[in-house]
Image (cartoon, rainbow, N blue to C red):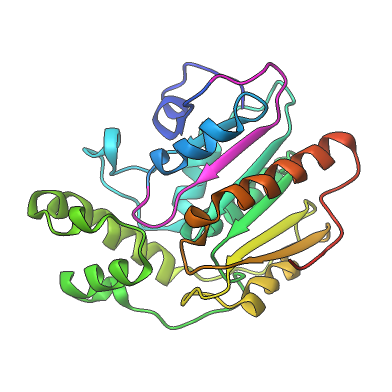
Amino acid sequence: MADRSGAEHQLWLRSFHQATPGAPRLLCLPHAGGSASFYFPVSKALSPAVDVRAVQYPGRQDRHLEAPLDSVQDLARGVFRALDERDGTPLALFGHSMGAMVGFELARLLEDAGRPPAVFFVSGRRGPSVERSEDVHQGDDARLIEEVTRLGGTDGAVLRDEEMLSMILPVLRADYRAVETYRHTPGPRLSCPFVALTGDADPRVTPEEARTWSQETDGPFELHVYPGAHFYLVAQQQAVLARIEATLRRLASGTGAGTGAVV
């Protein structure tokens, strides 16, 4: 994922801090309604030892004039086209909630291209083989706001600002449509290690559902459960970052992603 001047790279990827040359790369994929800036604290904490890049989906922040995409596969293809890993630096993926789904389809594309991720951190999302009937995206604005409020991922002040709401609701609806209409297509298992992370009180995924990610890889698998709900990773940031750092250090030393422990 070396720097380049290509338009797609500039559109899709954000880098907030300088990294040490040769540092492992961590590509972070946001949740529904989320943006690249959600991962600014991650970049600040891990840099310069880790080269943190964050994905900016269409329709938000500096891409607000673009129409949002409402397909997980289309989002994954957009990120894939923006990547350039010709320098051979290992690429780790971190996806939270919808980002885990986009990351999964991205990992498939990378594997097919002969460039599998070094490790895939899947956060706050059940494995793709576990399907539920969900239709929040088909409801009115009040229902969409109620769901986002329940999960706690959006500042309440934003949800009370009519002007801000008019900007974010189309993005939220497109993201929820992408999530809720996604259907897992069976295919070859991935080869990279998976590290699943989840909150013990997440209304969207149980620890048992998070464990089903193990069905998607032939590599090592770990599950780590933290106190908290859907956005457990905010309150548990220090512990989550420590897990990421420890995993990347093990991979760099050639000792693998872990032992499959449940914490």
Q: Quadrant of the N terminus?
A: top right
User: Where is 261 relative to 55, above or below?
Assistant: below
Residue range highlighted in magenta: 18-34
User: Where is 253 relative to 244, above or below?
Assistant: above
Report which quarter residue 127 is drawn in.
Answer: bottom right
* Front residue of this view, candidates 200 and 74: 200
Residue drawn at x 91%, y 44% is: 255
Based on the picture, tell me whether residue 22 belongs to the magenta stretch.
Answer: yes
* Front residue of this view, candidates 168 and 112: 168
Residue drawn at x 26%, y 46% is: 67
User: Where is 185 relative to 34, above or below?
Assistant: below
Residue drawn at x 52%, y 76% is: 201
Q: Position of residue 78 (x, y in %)?
A: 47, 41
Q: Position of residue 160 (x, y in %)?
A: 13, 59
Q: Quadrant of the C terminus?
A: bottom right
Q: Main secondary structure of the magenta part?
A: loop
Inspect this view and state whether residue 118 appears. Answer: no
Left or right, 75 with respect to 110, comes to left
Residue drawn at x 62%, y 51% is: 240
Report which quarter residue 110 is drawn in.
Answer: top right
* Front residue of this view, candidates 204 and 226: 226
Based on the picture, tell me whether residue 176 belongs to the magenta stretch.
Answer: no
Q: Position of residue 43 (x, y in %)?
A: 53, 33
